[in-house]
Image (cartoon, rainbow, N blue to C red):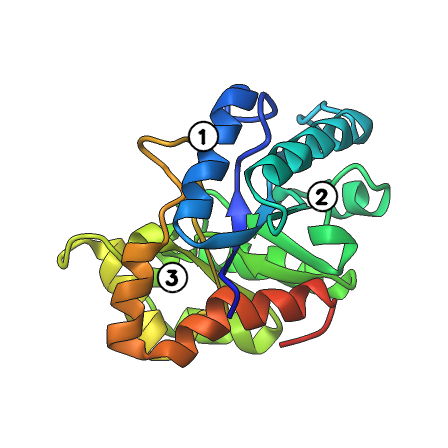
Amino acid sequence: MNGYFDIHSHILPGVDDGAKDMNETRRMLLTAYEEGIRIIVATPHYVAGKTDISIGRLMTIYDEVNQTAASVSKDYRIVLGNELFFNQELINALEKGEALTIDGTRYILIEFLPDTTYEEMKRGLSCCIYAGYIPILAHAERYYCLYRNLEYVDELIKSGAYIQLNLSCITGKPMNSRTIFGHQLLKRKWVHFLGTDTHDTYYRAPFARKAVTIMKKRYGENTVRQLLWENPMTMIENKHL
């Protein structure tokens, strides 16, 4: 493994609630690199019918961030996608190219409101699957409907969805409900991807090493390799895990 692959980040400056400017982006990139991260998917928030930044403008910013990453290290790679909020207009936005899959693959990183019902979540993910996309449920530890019923996670996976956890939930306090939930999923091998979900270098920094240390101790080196390198590389190749 040549480093870690972060599939969820908000490092593009000035496009959402993530990095405010290129200086902050550079600090985030430096921190991530020091933490061992070598590939990052930039996933700015997208809400169909509300997000108005053009793809052309997004690509320009993305190119600038890639140049900044290259100034940190030549082996740094930035990939472009979106963190997509599910609503009834999303599939049409994807088909029109207004919303982005991850690196042009069929994979999409998708989120819901924390208090969404399981029925709403399952219906939304199924809609994406029927349209030909491969949904990755972003920061699964946030959804009340899931950690109240673990078996729902298994149902979503069997339906064709994949699960992403934020690394921060792995390092939380032992009695934290999100941390408990995250480790329950890891024990059951119901996690497919990990991400920093970084928004800055202070409160939501791109930290990875502490979570990796915990995971190696509790779940082994192979699990770390699979979730932070092998599965993301399979995703980029547009293949099913």
Residue at the (31%, 78%) spot, across then down:
219
Residue at the (69%, 34%) spot, across then down:
62
- Say which amino acid is labelled 1: Arg
- Say which amino acid is labelled 3: Leu
Q: Label 3: state its secondary structure.
A: helix
Q: Quadrant of residue 239?
A: bottom right
Measure the C-alpha gap from mark 1 to mark 2.
Answer: 32 Å
Residue 227 x, y percent position in the rendering: 48, 69
Q: How many marks?
A: 3
Of the image marks 2 and 3, the number of the one nearer the N terminus: 2
Disc nearest the viewer among 1 and 3: 1
Residue 155 x, y percent position in the rendering: 49, 75
One can see residue 237 in this view: yes
Nearest the eye: 238 or 30: 30
Nearest the eye: 12 or 46: 12
Q: Label 1: state its secondary structure.
A: helix
Q: Are marks 2 and 3 in contact (CB under 8 Å)?
A: no
Residue 183 x, y percent position in the rendering: 28, 68
- The residue identified by callout 3 is 146
Nearest the eye: 159 or 23: 23
- The residue identified by callout 2 is 90
Relative to 128, is 152 on the left or the right?
left
Measure the C-alpha gap from mark 2 to mark 3.
Answer: 23 Å
- The residue identified by callout 1 is 27
